[in-house]
Each structure stands twice: as C-alpha cells, then as structure tokens.
Image (cartoon, rainbow, N blue to C red):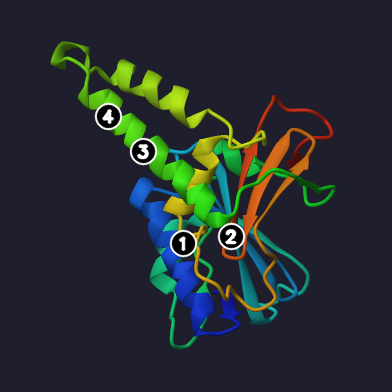
Amino acid sequence: MTVLHLADEREAADLAAFLSRLLHYDRGAAVRLQAAGTALAVFGRPPSFEVLAIRAVRLAKPYENGLDVLLDVTVSAGELLETVEEKAATAAVPAAVTGPPWAGVLPPRGGWRRETGLPAPDGLLAVVGAAVGEFRSRTEELAPEHRTRAELDRIGREIWSRTVGGTRLPVRAVHAAQSLGFLRTRAGGPDGAAPLGLFSSGAWLRLGTPYGSVAVRRAGLGALDVSVR
C-alpha cells in the first residue's frame, strides 16, 4: 500500500479535517489525489455548493512503493480518512474507485491571473452571514403550503448565485470556503502559504486562501478552459 509521509502533525490534522468536512456533506464522497515530489493536491466536490475544493498538503518526502514520479488516483474520502495517523503524520492511499464525473475535469494547472475587488476575510465572512440570514428570514416568512423544496431551492439559487463585491465570484464559493474551514480571519496561516486572493483562468475562478482553494466554472467547457486528466 502506498504510504504518504506528511510534513508534520498539523498537515495531517488539516487533511483529516478537510476529509471530515467533505464527508459531512456527502458520506460517499470521493477525492482525487495528485502528487509529485513533496506536494499533494486533494480535490473534492461538496454537492451542496457546486464547487471544487482543493486542499494542498505538504509531504515530508516523496511517497513510497515504487511511485517515483506521479501519483494520480481517485479514492474514497472515508477510507483515506481512516488511514490518517496524525501523530505519525502519515496516510495510506486506499484502493482506487471509479471516479465521479467531476474528477475527470479539473481546473487548469497554470495560466491564472489575479482578479481585483475581493474583500478582506472579515468582509467575506460578513457576506456569507448576511446571505445565510436572508435565506433564513425569507424561508421563515413563507406560508406552510408554499414552503416546498422547489421554492427553497429557488430562493437559495437566487441568493447564492449573487456575486461578491465587484468580482464575478458567486457567494456560494465563499460559503463553501467558510464551511470547509478555508476562510479564517486569524493571522498566521501555514508557513509559506499564499495570502487570500481571487484568480481567473479561462472560464474558471479560484478563491485561494492559506488553507485551501475553491474553484468554480463560470461557463461551459472549452478547449482552453479545462484540464481533462
């Protein structure tokens, strides 16, 4: 079995927390793992938010058992979580599973450019708080006979599809980042992590934080807009 040696206990704990949050939204969640050298990217798709979540994990050394160049496999998030040993800072890669459709279409690896107009973390959290409050108040005002799943979904789509500030980023992407533990206001993120930022590449937008990223596709597939691997 392939063993991943994570950089330290904090990396292992953060990976376990990310997997746990994905499983909260989907008990059968799958994740796609891509690793080269001492960098591991873990991709997941919480169904409630319609976004791709990416958690970057630092490895202490390249993985073992003959995988010398690349690791690219889709596995059960639950089975991977069961193998995470925080004190030992290790995880074992479980057997591959048949990946869901999203796992075959990932954001591009390069070509990202920074977008302007993104509020600070506390401003983003205020946007999410206001959206949650509006959804709650509007649904509570509905008469019982009108409080149907279709109507709740309609209100949710209207609120969460709004964009943040002067950007093209939908509020649902910020909500996903907050719910997955990527959006925090306290200082002192992981060593060497990039600061909060919004980036675009083709039809994709990516909200990057020191703790992980959320990517959302704004339009249909295009030859230059996706990476099918």
Q: Which residue is mark 4?
A: 137
- N-terminal label among 4 and 2: 4
- Who comes first in sequence, dot 3 or dot 4? 3
Camera-nearest residue between 45 and 183: 183
Q: Position of residue 105 (x, y in %)?
A: 67, 40
Q: Which residue is mark 3?
A: 132
Observer-side mark, 4 or 2, equals 4
Q: Is residue 27 above or below residue 37?
A: above
**Residue depicted at x 46% and y 61%:** 18
Amino acid tagged 2: Gly
Q: Give the mark nearest the N terminus, 3 or 2.
A: 3
Give me the residue at 38% from left, 53% from top: 23
The residue that label 1 is drawn on is 18
Mark identifier at residue 212: 2
- Which residue is at 38% across, 22% downward? 155
What's the distance in space between the residues labelled 2 and 1, CA to CA?
9 Å
Tell me the kind of residue under disc 1.
Phe
Q: Is residue 222 left or right of residue 220?
A: right
